[in-house]
Image (cartoon, grey):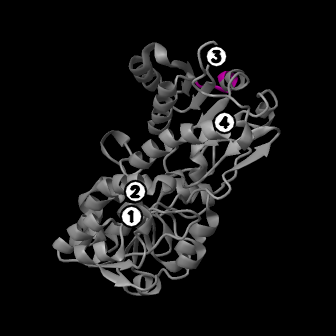
Amino acid sequence: MRIGCPKEIKNHEYRVGLTPESVRELSAHGHEVWVETGAGLGIGADDGQYRQAGAAIQDGPDPIFAECEMVVKVKEPQAVERAKLREGQVLYTYLHLAPDPEQTADLVKSGVTGIAYETVTGPGNTLPLLKPMSQVAGRMSIQAGATALEKAHGGRGVLLGGVPGVLPGKVMVIGGGVVGFNAAQMAVGLGADVTILDRDPEVLERLGTHFESRAKTLFSSQASIEQTICEVDLVIGAVLIPGAAAPKLVSREMLKCMKPGAVLVDVAIDQGGCFETSHATTHADPTYVVDGIVHYCVANMPGAVARTSTYALNNVTLPHALKMADLGWREALRRNSHLAEGLNVHAGKVTYQAVAEELGYPYASVAEVLAGS
């Protein structure tokens, strides 16, 4: 198979779909890999390293989109990239379609086969291709929140860990999954006063066992969110409904009781955000203020630590890429029901139920798609 890896063009996105080591693996399986010049510079990998790994370097993205059977990326294709996609081509990347009707419409129109990292499953309903970026984003959320709390960045001027004689900052983490757990770990490590909210008793028990007295747990309800949010300096939004738009758990009305200069970090912004007042921002302009509350809603947080993120991502995406290249995407999905969950669009049809329901498309099941080939 001819596999292409274009340079990411989203604002301040420095990750890359394939590392030189991944290119070497694909080449060793007999596949032809095309990489756009400069695609790996954000992770410190130059064209020479890709050539040495077996890649053919292309001057721009056009040959990759025009001639490669599978395109491997990190972020969802931007409008100019979507215009280059074509029927019969496999797009393997993060898509986050539910809150993005324009992208969904373009992918449906193109006829491309879109396999989304974020909906590929693992044993026990896990999301293994989302997990490493959730780990990164969870850890970064505390760094970002701590910076936004500084007075020079519009915050309250609170040091999360405090100092002897001064109480630490209070952190509220909504959602105890991978993002929330990693955020809580970082906040606890800094010495903050941490409360984690979740609705799953098993999750709360697991968090309580892990953190013991270093963090508090609380059942998540509208009442508990309303009560806790008035007392804290930093709120981390870490909820996820796989493939679907995030629920709005913090209303604008709730901001009125918050401390002026408190910070909201919405890690769910890729799926539309879990705060009513959230809208996506970029690393170039990461924050804005609503009713005196600082909002940090960068939609590609892991892109800021591109090298760590890219290698963590490739560790989990490469095995599936190899299977699709070796067997063809249809056979790879037939043999692996977890990978099949990643199919979001195919030949003008929406094949992920949560996306179809959210955006009003007819739903075509993956089983129908594979049976019809």
Q: Which residue is mark 2?
A: 307
Q: Is residue 222 magenta?
A: yes
Q: Are marks 2 and 1 in contact (CB under 8 Å)?
A: yes
Residue count near mark 3 (Cα–Cα under 10 Å), binned few <14, some 14–19, many ≥20: some
Choose between 118 and 362: the one closer to the eye.
118
Q: Residue type at mark 2: give it.
A: Arg
Q: Looking at the figure, which quarter contains the N terminus?
A: bottom left
Q: Which residue is mark 3?
A: 167
User: Which dot, 3 or 4, sits closer to the camera?
Assistant: 3
Using the numbered discs, state the Cα–Cα distance from disc 3 to disc 4 in whole angstroms: 28 Å
Q: Which residue is mark 1?
A: 44
Choose between 22 and 101: the one closer to the eye.
22
Taking the image as shown, residue 82 lies to the left or right of residue 33, namely right
Task: Name the main secondary structure of what is drawn in magenta.
Answer: helix
User: Which dot, 4 or 2, sits closer to the camera?
Assistant: 2
Q: Looking at the figure, which quarter contains the C terminus?
A: bottom left
Q: Residue at x 43, y 42 (%)?
A: 135
Q: In the displayed structure, would residue 78 be above or below residue 312?
A: below
